[in-house]
Amino acid sequence: MTVKGNPVIIIQARMGSSRFPSKTLHSLHGMPLIAWLIEGAHAFSNAEGIAVAVPDLPEDDVLDEYVQSLGIPCVRGPAEDVLGRYHLAAAALNADPVIRLCADSPLVAADFMDLMIESHVETGADLTNAGRYPLGSVGEVISFRALDSMRREATASYCREHVTPYIHEHPGSFRINTLLPPVWMQRDFRLTIDNATDMKMMDRLFEELEKAGLTPNFTNAMALLDVKPEIAQINATVRQSDWRSESPVFGKG
C-alpha cells in the first residue's frame, strides 16, 4: 500500500559510543551492523526513501563514506542533539512523516512498521509508537510538525538526545497514536546492541539462523528464539538506559 505524504526512514547512527565504540561498523555475520539496518529498511513497503543522520564529527567521516557507498544519503548534524539532527535530515529530504530507526537494532519488524506508517497517516498523528514488543524491533513514526515544534520548544538534554520525550511530557499538545503489535510479537526479547553482551547474543542468533537455513530477519528470529530460548538468555539481564529516569514528569525528582 502507498500512503500519502513523503514517509522517509531516517536511521540515527554514530561511531562514538562509551559502551561499544565503533559498533555501527562492527561486523555482524559478515556485514557491518549499519548494513543490516539498511537492508531491513529496504523491506518497508510504505516508505519512499532511506537516509542516515550522522554526527558532524571527524570520527564519523568513515561512517558517512561507507553509507554513501551503499547508495544511501547521509545528513550530518549535531553529535549530541539527535533531535536537531533529525530535523535537519527531515527538512533536507522533505520527509513527512519521519520513520525513526536506531542503528543498533539490526532486526527491525518491517511488516509491522508498515502498519504503523499507515495508521500514522490515517489518524493524522504526531507520533505513532507501539505497545509491547521486543526491544530494538520497532521504531517510531513522527510528523514533521511535531519535529519542528520539539526543535523549537525542547530544551532539556535528554529531550534532545532521545528525540521524542518532549511529546510524552506534553501529551495535550500532540496527538499520540499507539498501535498494539500482534500477540506473537509481544515478547521481551532484547534485539538491540548496546554492549558486547548484546553483540554476543546477536552473533549467536545470526549463526543459528544460518544453520537453520533461515534469512536473518525479524520474523525468522522470533521463530528461532521460541525454539531456542537459551539464546535470548545471553543478554536477558542487560539493563537498558531510559530517558524517563531523567524526566521530572516520569521519574526524576
Image (cartoon, grey):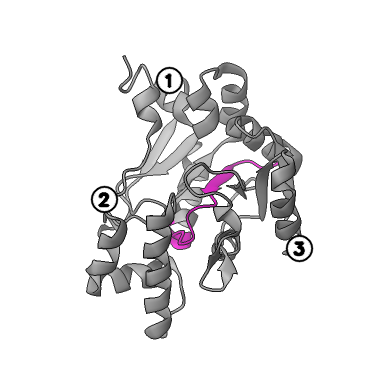
Secondary structure found at label 1: loop
Q: Which residue is mark 1?
A: 170
Q: Nearer the viewer, residue 149 or 237?
A: 237
Side of 87 relative to 20 (left or right): right
Secondary structure found at label 3: helix
Q: Amino acid at mark 2?
A: Thr
Q: Which residue is mark 3?
A: 69
Secondary structure found at label 2: loop
Q: Callout 2: few (<14), some (14-19), or many (20+) C-alpha neighbours within 10 Å?
A: few
Query: Which one is earlier in the sequence, the residue at label 2 or at label 1?
Result: 1
Residue 201: percent from left, percent from top: 36, 63
Residue 207, can we see it?
Answer: yes
Residue 163, can we see it?
Answer: no
Residue 192: percent from left, percent from top: 42, 54
Question: Which disc number belongs to residue 237?
Answer: 2
Relative to 35, is 9 above or below? above
Q: Residue at x 41, y 19 (%)?
A: 172
Residue 84: percent from left, percent from top: 64, 30
Residues at badges 2 and 3 in contact (C-beta under 8 Å)? no
Relative to 174, is 229 above or below? below
Query: Which one is earlier in the sequence, the residue at label 1 or at label 3?
Result: 3
Q: Residue at x 45, y 62 (%)?
A: 107
Q: Amino acid at mark 3?
A: Ser
Which residues are drawn in magenta? 94-112
C-alpha span from label 2 to label 3: 37 Å
Nearer to us: label 1 or label 3 = 3
Residue 112: percent from left, percent from top: 42, 57
Nearer to us: label 2 or label 3 = 2
Residues at badges 2 and 1 in contact (C-beta under 8 Å)? no
